[in-house]
Each structure stands twice: as C-alpha cells, then as structure tokens.
Amino acid sequence: MAGWVFVVDDDMTNLLAAGNILSQNNIRVTAIKSGKKLLSHLKNNKPDLILLDILMPEMDGFETYEKLREQEKDRDEEETPVIFLTADEDKNSENRALQLGAVDYIHKPLNEEVLLKRISNVLENTSKIKELINDATIDGLTGFLNKSAVNEKLLSVCKDTDGALMILDIDNFKKVNDLYGHDKGDLVLKAFSDIIKTNTREQDIIGRIGGDEFVIFLKNFKGENGISSLNDRINQQLAVKMHELVGDTLPFNTGVSIGVSFIPNDGRDYDLLFRKADTALYQVKQHGKHGYNIFSDSMEQVIEYDVASKDEIERISNLLKENETYNSALWIGQDAFSHIYRYMLLYIRSYNGTAYKVLFNATPVSSDMTKVEFTECMKKFGTFLSNSLRKSDVMMQNGINEFFLFLPDIDEQYIDSVIGRLITSWQKLDFSSKINVSYETEIISSDCENDGKRRSGDFSKK
C-alpha cells in the first residue's frame, strides 16, 4: 500500500495523529496546515492522495478542492484523488463533498483501521484505473500516446495553447523492415523514440500515429530557427543510431522528414493544423526527404505540375536510388524478396533469360550448441554469402537455418564454379567448423517452371 499522502488540516493535533498512523504503516506523509500552502506545494510535488479537512480558516476544504482542480487543469495534470476529513456530522457536507468529486469522506476523530482501509482502497483503485488508461492510450513499443489518445488530447490543447505542430516520418523505414526484418525495425523505432524524448521537453505532447509516423506538439514554440535546429539534431542523431544498429551495410539513406504548422498562425482547429503540417511534410517527401518544411498558404493555392527537363530523369532516378552504395548481394526480407522474385520470373520467361535458385540449409555440428550461438553463426554465414556474391544477386533468410538465393544470368556451365568458389571461401573461415551446410540448386529458364520442370505455353515465348 506504500504511497505518498498529503494531510491538510489547520489543527496540529489532527496532523500528528494522521501522520503517526500513516508513517507507522510505511506510508510517506507530508503535513500541510492550510489550503493555500497545499496549492503552493503541489506546483512542484505530486502525491498519490490528499486527505483534506473541510473546516479550515481563510480557505475551507471545498474552496481548496475547487482551486486544486483548476490548477491541475491549467497545468494539464492528472487529478489527484482527495478524501475529505471532517468532525461535522452534517449529511449535507458529505453530499457536497461527493458531488464535487471526492473519492471518499472520513469522520474525525480518525479511526486507524478505517483510515488505512479507505486509503488502501483508493490507492488500489487508482492504480488499476491508471493501468487501464495506460493500456488504452499508450503505444507499447515507444511509450508515446497512441493515435486515438494523442488526437483526442490535441483537439483540446490546440484550442487554447500556442505552439508548433510537427508531423515526423522516418524515411525509407519500410526498406529497413524488408532488408533487416521487423525485429530490427522495432529497434529503430525504439531508438527514434529515445531521440525524440532527448530533444523535447516534458511539457511537449508526443504521439505515434502510424508505423513510422509521429506527431509532436511543442508548447509555446515559435520561429523557424528552432525548428531547423531540431531537425538537424534529430537527423544527425538518427544517422548515428542507424550506424550502431546495422553498421555500414545499409544500402540507402535513412533520415526524418518533418512537416510543421504553427498555432495560432495557421489556426486552432487540430484537424486543420494536422492537414497543413501533413501538406508541408508531403513537400519534403517530394523534394529529397531528410529535412523539414513549414506550411504556407501557397502550398494549397498552387497545384504543382512536374515539367519535364533534361535533368528531370536524373533527379527522379537519384531520388529513387537513395544513394545506394552496396557492393554485395542484396539481402532483404521475404516480402521484398517475393516481389523481386516474381518480377524476375516474368522477365526471364519473356526475354529468354536464365537464373539459378540456391537453397542453403545449415545445422549445428554439436548438439550442445545453444540457440543463441547458432543464430550468431547463421548471421555470420549470411554476411559471408552476401559479401561473396555479386551486386546483382538477391538473397533472403528463411527461418533460422536457411538462406534462399536468386542468381540471375547464370547458366548450367557456371553454377558449379560459383558453388565451388563459395565452398572454398567458406572452409577458410574459423566458424565454418561449427555448422554443417548443405545446398540445392535449380535452374530457371524461359522454358522451365519454378520447380525445374519444362512447361508449355505461349506466354514466355518470343
């Protein structure tokens, strides 16, 4: 039941009595002698419960309660549970206390058993409510508000609070998932959420509104210089973190694109502000990514048409390539692999090409090898394959112990030499003795089905 309780009473005898009961039961107690001092103390402290006497001079318990709720609302804080204390037997006082929103009502003099039971009930119920609210409003991966919760909150906040509304989108995140898998993608999202936390204030509101899309409301934030600086920090820190997570193997650039609208300049309606920030984000995405844009009315007044020019093909090509610099086989996830595989089958059958499918299967040499050790060996084996193959080759991992390769433009007279070269290089590696590797190959050509059998039909003939 341990918690922190504020006891508010102008009578020192009552403060001492309550303090002794609670402290002897391992409950932290703070004694306060007036409603005014309570409100002041709450500006920098947040108890789990307040025991508030009704009959006090200057400001009674009811007035104190009402001012407390106003203060919490102004500061955008959760309401602290309040139990009223009184020696008055008048039922009207009890009814008024409960109508105001008090969680309970205790008569003085205090009975230890009753006091502890009431406090225990309140703290347990409050904890359960917080858990339910947390489950319903918090994104489990990042710890930020989820989409529905942050939208509901910002609908209210934008009406009376100035600031900047930002929509952030991680560039090429789908490629990260396709290339390294969803587990690695989750690590990127967690790392990105840490970067956001580091670069925002406690008073700011943050939510995850999509797989790789976030919204941030920076309270009382003005000016483009601050946005520019924040954009630079976030992009620089994400680049460092991506290098830590995947090393130098990333074949494309990642970064963050940011769209911004300002309150009150762009309005106070959250839906409108969001649309404007999203419009600004779209402009960033269309012009190279990894940057920010602040909404202006011209973005909605002008429909942009791309006018062909001698540099347009190069610009679009560079945008699509995202500065790919890999010098090894493309190691991607199953979803991306399936798209490439289907396309290459159609291409081979349409243009009389050839390719080979290769399946590598590995098992531990020793039955004592742990799953962690085997997984690490397979990671090394995958890296070995990727680095040993051509840039035009594509591979994916299937489960823990298999790699499936697609090798275009190879025919029967060359596949043996490719496999032989892989085996020779593999046997030179120290960890090769820890796993047994077997392989199967199958040719794909314009007159073969996927399983190597011949097929007939007009579709693939030229």
Image (cartoon, helix red, strand yellow):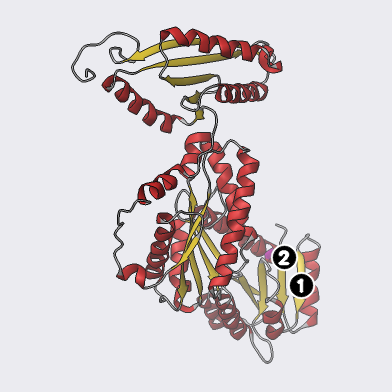
Left or right of 347? Residue 232 is right
* Circle number at residue 299: none
Most common SS among magenta residues: helix
Estimate the x, y position of residue 403 in percent, counting from the top left.
51, 20
Looking at the image, residue 335 lies above or below residue 91: above
**Image coords of residue 280 (percent x, y):** 42, 64
Task: Name the residue: 64% across, 64% down.
Answer: 118
Please name the amino acid that badge 2 sits on.
Answer: Trp
At label 1, counting other C-alpha atoms closer than 10 Å, the crowd grade (few under 14, some 14-19, many 20 or more) is some
Q: In this view, does 315 lie to the left or right of 328?
A: left
Residue at position x 47%, y 36% in the image: 178
**Residue where numbered disc 1 is placed:** 30
Q: How far apart are marks 1 and 2 (CA)?
A: 8 Å
Quarter the C terminus occupies: top left
State yes or no: discs 1 and 2 in contact (Cβ < 8 Å): yes
Question: In screen coordinates, is 330 left or right of 85?
Answer: left
Q: Position of residue 342 (x, y in %)?
A: 34, 26
Mark 2 burial class by Cα count in 10 Å: few <14, some 14-19, many 20+: some
Q: Is mark 1 on a helix, strand or loop?
A: strand
Residue closer to the observer: 59 or 193: 193
What residue is pinned by disc 2? 4
User: Which stretch did the figure color magenta?
Assistant: 110-114
Numbered disc total: 2
User: Does residue 155 appear in the picture of this structure?
Assistant: yes
* Vertical side of 295 occupied by 289: above or below: above
Which of the pair 179/156 is nearer the observer? Answer: 179
> What's the residue at 69%, 85% (across, down)?
36
Q: Is residue 379 above or below residue 93?
A: above
53 or 133: nearer the viewer:
133
Q: Is 113 in the magenta?
A: yes
Give the SS element for disc 2.
strand
Q: Which amino acid does label 1 sit on?
A: Thr
